[in-house]
Amino acid sequence: MTPADLMLRRYAAQGLATEAGRIALGYFGRQESLGVTMKGAQDWLTVADGAVEDFLRARLTELFPGDTVIGEEGGGEASDAVWILDPIDGTANFAHGDRNWCISIGFLFNREPTIGIVAAPALDELYVGQRGQGATLNGRKIAVSGIDDLRQASIELGWSSRIPPQRYVDMIGRGYDAGCSVRRVGSGTLGLCNVATGRTEGYAELHINAWDVAAGIVIVGEAGGWVSDFFAGDGISKGNPILCCTPALASQLSEITGIS
Ligand code: IPD
């Protein structure tokens, strides 16, 4: 794939993320139109998830017929050129009328996270990252925080019902013991983006799926962050733990979270 092919994909995905954001905003805050169903405990699905994924899948397939697409709702196959989509990350927030949700479009070339686009339309934010080209928020270059003392650090620890609660609770305890401020906002994708802008120093989750992090990994890596090797092994199909943070805190946060 040439640099021009990659640039085309990046600009196309940027435009599609913005359009998808408009579709999602059409549902946001209109409880009666959300058609909420539950896939499991705290695992929310709304009609907006399906509508956004259908839109993105159709447009990406039309524009790049040789690429494959994997989406949270519709699944799909990996290939050397694969798009990984989360139509709405932070669906529980979305369904509650909380603005911390986003659309995540990641592109992996030869298994390398290469393009990451995240649109958070209710926050009026668009994150763009491309391997070797830096990362931006609303067109401005972003970089991870310079804080190197855990007693000044704010970290987000993601949770899902896929992991026994005690492991999560123990990790939080170790974070507080080390002097961190610990939070959870509820969108893994925005958790990574927040590290990229320096709003937090780290994001960790004991298990997360590829669609939640494929775009964010590019963005935080390009903003100078350290990221664990999420795509090792079966990461693309089964998920893995993730830790991303400002490099100065990588070894300490790795010890606290058990993720390296
Ligand atoms: C979830 C969110 C949450 C994270 C979970 C994800 P969804 O994704 O990113 O913050 O902790 O692991 O499953 O269901 O809102 O797309």
Image (spheres, grey):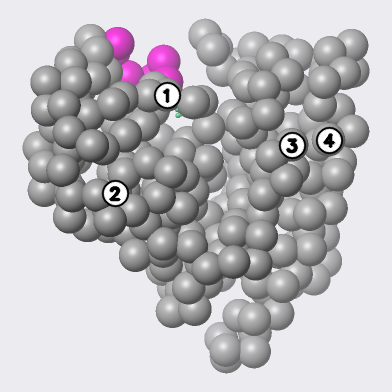
Question: Camera-side residue: 219 or 150?
Answer: 150
Q: Residue at x 67, y 73 (%)?
A: 9
Q: Residue at x 26, y 37 (%)?
A: 153
What whole-number distance in Å separates the C-alpha atoms at marks 2 and 4?
30 Å
Element at label 4 = helix
Q: Does 162 lie within the magenta span?
A: yes
What whole-number distance in Å separates the C-alpha atoms at marks 1 and 2?
15 Å
What whole-number distance in Å separates the C-alpha atoms at marks 1 and 4?
23 Å
Element at label 3 = helix
Q: Residue at x 81, y 26 (%)?
A: 28
Residue 139: x, y in percent?
65, 67
Mark carried by residue 245: 2
* Tag 1 residue: 184
* Tag 3 residue: 122
Cβ–Cβ under 8 Å for marks 3 and 2 = no
**Does the residue tagged 1 have its C-beta within 8 Å of any atom of ligand 1?**
yes
Mark carried by residue 25: 4
Residue 80: x, y in percent?
50, 71
Res. 82 visible in picture: no
N-terminal-most mark, 2 or 4: 4
Q: Is residue 133 above or below residue 106?
A: below
Quick one: quadrant of the N terminus? bottom right
N-terminal-most mark, 1 or 4: 4
**Does the residue tagged 2 have its C-beta within 8 Å of any atom of ligand 1?**
no
Total numbered labels: 4
Cβ–Cβ under 8 Å for marks 4 and 3 = yes
Q: Main secondary structure of the magenta part?
A: loop
